Amino acid sequence: MNLKSLTTLFIILFSNSLLAQDHAGVIVKIKGKSELFTQPSKTLSAGQTQKVLFEGLYYSVEPIKLGTKVTPGSVVRTGADAKLRLVYKNGDQVTVGPATSYQIIVGAKKTEDEKSSIKLMYGAIRSVVSKEGPRSGMNVKTRTAAMGVRGTDFFISQRGSSGNTRVAVLRGEVEVKPKDKNDVLNVKSGFTAAVVENKNDIKAEVKQTTQQELISIQKDSLIKTSEAEVDSASDAVKAEIAQLEKKATDVTLNDIKRYDEKLYNKLKTVAVKSVDELNTLSVKKIFKDAPKNQGKISSEDLENLEMDAYEEFFKVQN
């Protein structure tokens, strides 16, 4: 290989390395046990045994902890009782619910087919994405639908093996295109699109998000990291997490300002401590005007919510 070829190869590898670093999310909150699948390959090398076959590829596996960096192409998988949140250096955030597996893919260009995208294999995620950031306009794909994120606080779930997809928008707008369909559904704040596969046909509809659905979203959004997990993190990791959480709070506040100036002006008069508070306020506003629940809220649902958040934001009359 000549010098010119070596130089070109170095530039490509260096550029890809910078791209991966720019799009690396950092775990800032975690509850329960989760795993990160890295270094995907189509085949096993001779003698390799420490690999896991997942979705047709072989991965190295490592436990997720505070400060773990998630680079493009890696797969995040949470346990049945686990949740986590990762934040990018610009403040974009993804909260991953229990029993979830998803992958982030980063396109090198901003064409429609090469934008950043999330592949949700199963489970649920809630994400807040800055319209000025590198993930603006990203796509989310499930087994039965493709979503174009136009803004900016949204919750997507694909529960179990059915492949049915639900897309709830808490702020902004998401375009939903059911698989093998030409129609595109525009889902706005306070509404949920349900994409259901039934006997080789896929049907989709948009309805106002119910109170029960909003409580489910709130359950998955709230994460309390254990003291043991915090104590085990280094001072450098704790400092990095503090900076990222501040950035995530700023991004969320700016997003609220874009879509709800009245709420933003109200927030300026109080001391907002965290992203959790802002995300809860977003649910609260929709909750007040949401349709009644289909049946009573179970005691388990109430117990799983932080009581102060429930009392302040979810005063449901049963």
Image (tube, helix red, strand yellow):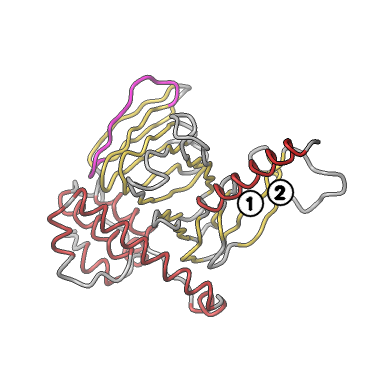
Relative to 280, residue 230 above or below: below
Q: Is residue 287 left or right of residue 29?
A: left
Q: Which mark is residue 52?
A: 2
What type of secondary structure mainly makes up the magenta span? Answer: loop
Foreground of the two, 47 or 121: 47
Q: Position of residue 282 (x, y in %)?
A: 24, 55
Q: Position of residue 288 (x, y in %)?
A: 16, 54
Which of disc 1 and disc 2 is earlier in sequence? 1
Relative to 238, residue 297 above or below: above
Please state the extent of the stretch shown in magenta in the rendering.
Answer: 179-191
Question: Which residue corresponds to mark 1?
Answer: 37
Q: Amino acid at mark 1?
A: Phe
Q: Is residue 261 left or right of residue 135?
A: left
Give residue 41's quadrant in the image.
Answer: top right
Q: Residue at x 54, y 56 (%)?
A: 78
Element marked by disc 1 = strand
Q: Position of residue 148 (x, y in %)?
A: 37, 35
